Amino acid sequence: MVDTVSNTVDRMSKLMTQLRNERLRAQQQEFKLIELLENAVDNGTGMDNQFIRHRLFKPFDST
C-alpha cells in the first residue's frame, strides 16, 4: 500500500510539473503573439465606399 501511495504521489508531482511547464510555454507563445499583433502595421488602402456599396456582398465577384 505504501509503495502504491508513493507511486501515486510521484506521478502527481510529475503531472503538476508538466502542467506548470505547459502553462509557462503557452504564456510565452501568447506574449509573442500579442507582441506581434501590437507591432503589426496596416498600410493598405482598404475598401472604398463604391466597392462596399456595389461589390462587397456579390457572390463570386473578385477584385
Image (cartoon, rainbow, N blue to C red):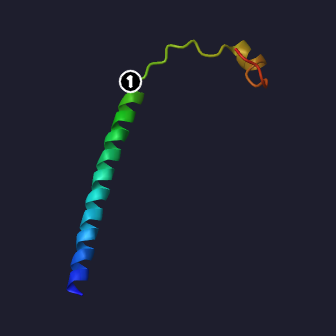
Measured from the top left, where is residue 10 in percent x and y? 23, 70
Measured from the top left, where is residue 22 in percent x and y? 32, 51
Instruction: Classify residue 54 as left or right of residue 36.
Output: right
Q: Which residue is mark 1?
A: 39
Instruction: Classify residue 5 as left or right of residue 41.
Output: left
Question: Please, is residue 63 above or below residue 16 in the view?
Answer: above
Q: Nearer the viewer, residue 25 or 30?
A: 25
Q: Nearer the viewer, residue 20 or 15?
A: 15
Q: Quadrant of the C terminus?
A: top right
> What number of labels is visible?
1
Q: Nearer the viewer, residue 12 or 49?
A: 12
User: In which quadrant of the rendered view does residue 2 lie?
Assistant: bottom left
Instruction: Classify residue 13 as left or right of residue 48.
Output: left
Badge 1 density bin: few <14, some 14–19, many ≥20, Cα 10 Å: few
Measured from the top left, where is residue 38 in percent x and y? 39, 28
Q: Residue at x 28, y 56 (%)?
A: 20
Instruction: Classify residue 60 as left or right of residue 2.
Output: right
Question: Please, is residue 51 above or below residue 34 in the view?
Answer: above
User: In which quadrant of the rendered view does residue 1 lie?
Assistant: bottom left
Q: Residue at x 25, y 81 (%)?
A: 4
Give SS at disc 1: helix
Measured from the top left, where is residue 53 in percent x and y? 75, 19
Q: Residue furthest bottom?
A: 1
Task: Indicate the amino acid at tag 1.
Answer: Asn
User: In which quadrant of the rendered view does residue 14 lie?
Assistant: bottom left
Question: Please, is residue 18 above or below residue 35 in the view?
Answer: below
Q: Residue at x 25, y 59 (%)?
A: 17
Question: Please, is residue 14 above or below residue 55 in the view?
Answer: below
Q: Nearer the viewer, residue 7 or 12?
A: 7
